[in-house]
Amino acid sequence: MAGVSDLIVLLPGKKVYFIELKNPNGKGRQSPAQREFEDNVRAHGHEYLIWDKWAQAEQFVNAHRQEIGNFVGVGGTENENTIH
């Protein structure tokens, strides 16, 4: 479906995050369908995030460590990014 975010993260307590990934070169912009999807997500009380840096994924995991548990890790460098 046009406009749906790249990632959907479900956490305990019915927390849902919709995450759009953009190129870090700054050229990636939301399409009209993506903006409409974001509006619908927010209207339903969910979080919509746009990430263009690997550090944002790492910060998200660290901020939600208690909910995520230790089975998810984030590692890597600017050239070698992995989520496992």
Image (cartoon, helix red, strand yellow):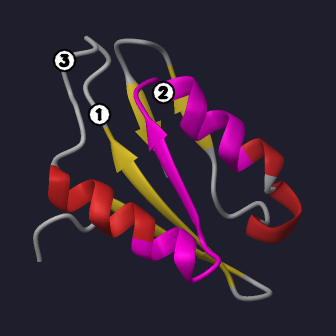
Measure the alpha-carbon separation of dots 2 and 3.
16 Å
Compared across the picture, whether 65 is left or right of 14 comes to: right
Left or right: 56 with respect to 80?
right
Distance of label 1 from label 3 (alpha carbons)? 8 Å
In the image, which is nearer the foreground, mark 2 or mark 3? 3
Q: Quadrant of residue 3?
A: bottom left
Q: Which amino acid lies under the numbered mark 2 shown in the image of this protein?
A: Trp
Residue 71, image x, y percentages:
68, 64
Q: Which residues are magenta?
A: 40-61
For disc 2, the neighbor class at 10 Å (few under 14, some 14 to 19, many from 20) is some
Query: Which kind of residue does numbered mark 1 sit on?
Result: Lys
Mark 1 highlights which residue? Answer: 22
Residue highlighted by disc 2: 54
> How many discs mark residues in the rendered view?
3
Residue 57 visible in this rendered orientation of the protein = yes
What element does badge 2 sit on? Answer: helix
Quarter occupied by the N terminus: bottom left
Residue at image point 29% right, 64% down:
36
